[in-house]
Image: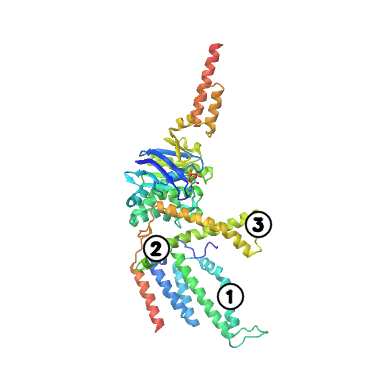
C-alpha cells in the first residue's frame, strides 16, 4: 500500500537527510524503523503523509503520489501521524475536543464526530476521561489521546515517531499495549524508535537506517543475528552462554523463549554427562 | 493564575443550555448598557439582574468571588484615583491629600460598573465551555468580509482556542525556566529587568519550537484553515430568541 521509490531528500539548508531509499509496506504490517540520532527516520516518515515531498524519487500511498497537491488531505486521512511530544500535539481544551479536531477538519456532521470520538476513546481506554483538560492527563494518557485523535480519522496506517521517548516506563507499556491492539485490529503500523527492546516482540519487520540509507531490512530474529552491539540484555545473555559452549540460539529476545532455550540446553547437558558417566 | 478565574463550571441549568451566540450577544448588549449607566438605582437593577441570573445558573458564589479577586488591585486603583483626583467638596484635607464627596460618588459608580461587567462576563464563561464560546464567536464573525484581510472566521476561532490551550503552557514554561535558572545560581528575583531579559530569550525559543510542532501536528490532522464542522452543534431554540428579544427590549426601553 505504501511504495517508496529511490527517495532522496535534501533540506533547504543543504543537508542530505535521505539518500536513495527504496521500500514497500504492506497492508496490516507492523514495521519498526530504528537507527541512531539524525539518521533520517523522522525525515523518512514525514514523507508518508506528505508533510515533506521528495527532492528526488517518489512516494505513493494507496496509489496516490504524495507530490500531487490535490491528494494531500486524502493521504493525511489515510496515514495518521503521532509525534514525540505529548504537549504540542494536543490542540483541544478537553480530551474529547482534541480527538474531534481531525473529524472536524474532515467536515463531518456533529453526530458522526461524536460517534467517532467516543469509539476512538474507548479503543485507547480513555473514554471515562473525555471531559478532562490536558492538565489532568499524564504524558502516557496524552499520547494515547493523540492516538485516539488519529484513529478518529479512520486511517489505514498509523505512523508513530518516538511516541514513548518522553514517557515513564509504566506509561510506555500502556502506550505499547494500545499500539499492539491497533495492529491486531488490522491497522498498518510504522513505529519509529531508538529502543530496540520495546519493539522486537511486536514488529513483523525491522528496518534499520544509517546516514540517510536503509542498512538492514528483515525479521527481528534476522536483525539480531546481523548486529554486534546495541542488543537487548536477554540476547546478550544468550550470546554469552553460547560462547561458553551452551547449545542455545542467540537470536531470541523474549524472556519465555530464552527460558525454554536454556532449559533445553541444560537437559541436553545432563543427558550428555550421564551418558559419559 | 487562579483555577477558577473565568473558568467553565459544568452544569445543566437553563443558562448552560442557551446557545453561546445568545449569551455572547446578550453580554455585549448588557456591557453597552452598563457603560451608559450613571445612577445608583439603575446600577442596583443590574446587580439584581445579575443575582437572579447567577441563581438560575446554579454556579456557586465562590466562582464569582474568585473571578473578581485577580482584578482587586486594579479596582482599588481606579477607585482611589477618582476619590483623590476629582474636584469638589472635600471630605477632609491634610496637605495635598484631599478626597472629595464627588470623587467618592464617581469612584464607587465606576468600580461598581467594572465589577458588574466582570461578573456578567464570568457568568458567560462559567456556563459556556470555551469551545462553544469560540464556536459562537466564529458563527457571529462568519458574515463579516474577513477574507479581505486574509483571514477566515475559522482561523480566528482556532487561534482563540489555541490561545486558551497554550497560554497557560507558555506561562508554565516561563516559570520552569526561572526555577531552572535560580537552581543554577542565576537569581534575578530582585532585578525585574534582568528577570525579563533572561527569561524571555529561552521562552521565545521554546514558543517557536512549540508553535512549529503544533503546526505540523495540526496539518497532519488535516487542518486547512477554512470551513470545518464541530463536535458541538449550535442551535438557536425558542428560549434563545426569547432571551434576545427580552434583552433588546430592555435596551430600547433604557434609551427612551
Ligand atoms: N528542518 C531541518 N533543516 C535542516 N536539517 C534538518 C532538519 N531536520 C532534520 N535535519 C537534519 O537531517 C538529518 C536527519 O534528521 P531526522 O530528524 O530525520 O533524524 P532522526 O533519525 O529522526 O533523528 P532523531 O532520532 O534525533 O529523531 C539530520 O542530520 C538533521 O540534522
Ligand atoms: Mg526523529
Pointer 2 local density, CA inside 10 Å: few below 14, some 14–19, many at least 20: many
- Residue A133 appears in the picture as rendered: no
Residue A217 vertical position relative to residue B69 in the rendered view, above or below = above
Residue A82 at x, y percent in the picture? 44, 47
Q: Mark 2 sits on what residue? A: B135
Q: Name the one closer to the observer, A211 or B186.
A: A211
Label 3: chain?
A: B
Mark 2 Cβ and ligand 1 under 8 Å apart:
no
Provide the chain ID for the residue under circle 1: B
Q: Are marks 3 and 2 in contact (CB under 8 Å)?
A: no
Residue B20: x %, y % from top left? 40, 66
Q: Earlier in the sequence, mark 2 or mark 1?
A: 1
- What is the distance, in whole Å, between disc 3 and disc 2 at their CAs? 44 Å
* Label 3 SS: loop
Residue at the image position 44 percent from the left and 49 percent from the top = A146
From the viewer's perspective, is B246 left or right of B191?
A: left
In which quadrant is the C terminus of chain B drawn?
Answer: bottom left
Question: Where is residue B232, by image quadrant?
Answer: bottom left
Indicate which disc, 3 or 1, sits on the residue closer to the N terminus: 1
Residue B41: x %, y % from top left:
48, 82
Q: Residue at x 41, y 75 (%)?
A: B29
Select label 3 or label 1 by which is in front.
3
Q: Which residue is mark 3?
A: B186
Mark 1 sits near ligand 1, with its Cβ under 8 Å away: no
Q: Nearer the viewer, residue B20 or A72?
A: A72
Residue A65 tag number: none
Q: Is residue A43 above or below residue B251?
A: above
Q: Which mark is residue B77?
A: 1
* Residue drawn where x is 39% and y is 81% of the image: B253
Amino acid at each position: 500500500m505504501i511504495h517508496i521509490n529511490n527517495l532522496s531528500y535534501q533540506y533547504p539548508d543543504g543537508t542530505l537527510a535521505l539518500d536513495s531509499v527504496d521500500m514497500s509496506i504492506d497492508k496490516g504490517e507492523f514495521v519498526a524503523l530504528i537507527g541512531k540520532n539524525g539518521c533520517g527516520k523522522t525525515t523518512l516518515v514525514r514523507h508518508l503523509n506528505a508533510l515533506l515531498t521528495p527532492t528526488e524519487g517518489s512516494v505513493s500511498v494507496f496509489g496516490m503520489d504524495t507530490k500531487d497537491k490535490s491528494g494531500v488531505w486524502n493521504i493525511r486521512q489515510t496515514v495518521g501521524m503521532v509525534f514525540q511530544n505529548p504537549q504540542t500535539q494536543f490542540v483541544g481544551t478537553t480530551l474529547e475536543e482534541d480527538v474531534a479536531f481531525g473529524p472536524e477538519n474532515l467536515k463531518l456532521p456533529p453526530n458522526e464526530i461524536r460517534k467517532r470520538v467516543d469509539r476512538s476513546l474507548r479503543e485507547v481506554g480513555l473514554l471515562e476521561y473525555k471531559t478532562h483538560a490536558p492538565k489532568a492527563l499524564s504524558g502516557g494518557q496524552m499520547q494515547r489521546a493523540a492516538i485516539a485523535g488519529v484513529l478518529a480519522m479512520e486511517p489505514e496506517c498509523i505512523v508513530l515517531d518516538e511516541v514513548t521517548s518522553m514517557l515513564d516506563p509504566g506509561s510506555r507499556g500502556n502506550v505499547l499495549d494500545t499500539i499492539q491492539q491497533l495492529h491486531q485490529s488490522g491497522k498498518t503500523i510504522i513505529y519509529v524508535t531508538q529502543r530496540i527492546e520495546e519493539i522486537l516482540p511486536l514488529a513483523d519487520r525491522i528496518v534499520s537506517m544509517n546516514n540517510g540509507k536503509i542498512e538492514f531490512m528483515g525479521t527481528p530474529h534476522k536483525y539480531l543475528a546481523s548486529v554486534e552491539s546495541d542488543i537487548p540484555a536477554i540476547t546478550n545473555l544468550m550470546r554469552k552462554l553460547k560462547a561458553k559452549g551452551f547449545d542455545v540460539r542467540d537470536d531470541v529476545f523474549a524472556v519465555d523463549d530464552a527460558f525454554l532455550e536454556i532449559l533445553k540446553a541444560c537437559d541436553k547437558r545432563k543427558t550428555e554427562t550421564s551418558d559419559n558417566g | 493564575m487562579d483555577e477558577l478565574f473565568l473558568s467553565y463550571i459544568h452544569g445543566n441549568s437553563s443558562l448552560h443550555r442557551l446557545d453561546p451566540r445568545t449569551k455572547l450577544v446578550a453580554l455585549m448588549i448588557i456591557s453597552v448598557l452598563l457603560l451608559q449607566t450613571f445612577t445608583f438605582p439603575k446600577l442596583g437593577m443590574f446587580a439584581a439582574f445579575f443575582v437572579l441570573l447567577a441563581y438560575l445558573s446554579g454556579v456557586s458564589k465562590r466562582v464569582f468571588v474568585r473571578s473578581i479577586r485577580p482584578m482587586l488591585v486594579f479596582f482599588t486603583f481606579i477607585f482611589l484615583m477618582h476619590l483623590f483626583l476629582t474636584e469638589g467638596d472635600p471630605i477632609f484635607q491634610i496637605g495635598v491629600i484631599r478626597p472629595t464627596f464627588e470623587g467618592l460618588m464617581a469612584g464607587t459608580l465606576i468600580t461598581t460598573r467594572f465589577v458588574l461587567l466582570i461578573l456578567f462576563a464570568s457568568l458567560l464563561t462559567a456556563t459556556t465551555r470555551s469551545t462553544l464560546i469560540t464556536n459562537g464567536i466564529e458563527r457571529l464573525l462568519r458574515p463579516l468580509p474577513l477574507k479581505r484581510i486574509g483571514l477566515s472566521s475559522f482561523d480566528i476561532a482556532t487561534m482563540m482556542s489555541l490561545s486558551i490551550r497554550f497560554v497557560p503552557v507558555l506561562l508554565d514554561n516561563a516559570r520552569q525556566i526561572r526555577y531552572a535558572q535560580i537552581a543554577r545560581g542565576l537569581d534575578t528575583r530582585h532585578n525585574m529587568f534582568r528577570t525579563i531579559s533572561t527569561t524571555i530569550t529561552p521562552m521565545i525559543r521554546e514558543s517557536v519550537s512549540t508553535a512549529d510542532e503544533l503546526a505540523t501536528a495540526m496539518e497532519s490532522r488535516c487542518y486547512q484553515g477554512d470551513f470545518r464542522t464541530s463536535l458541538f452543534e449550535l442551535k438557536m431554540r425558542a428560549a434563545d430568541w426569547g432571551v434576545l428579544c427580552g434583552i433588546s427590549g430592555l435596551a430600547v426601553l433604557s434609551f427612551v
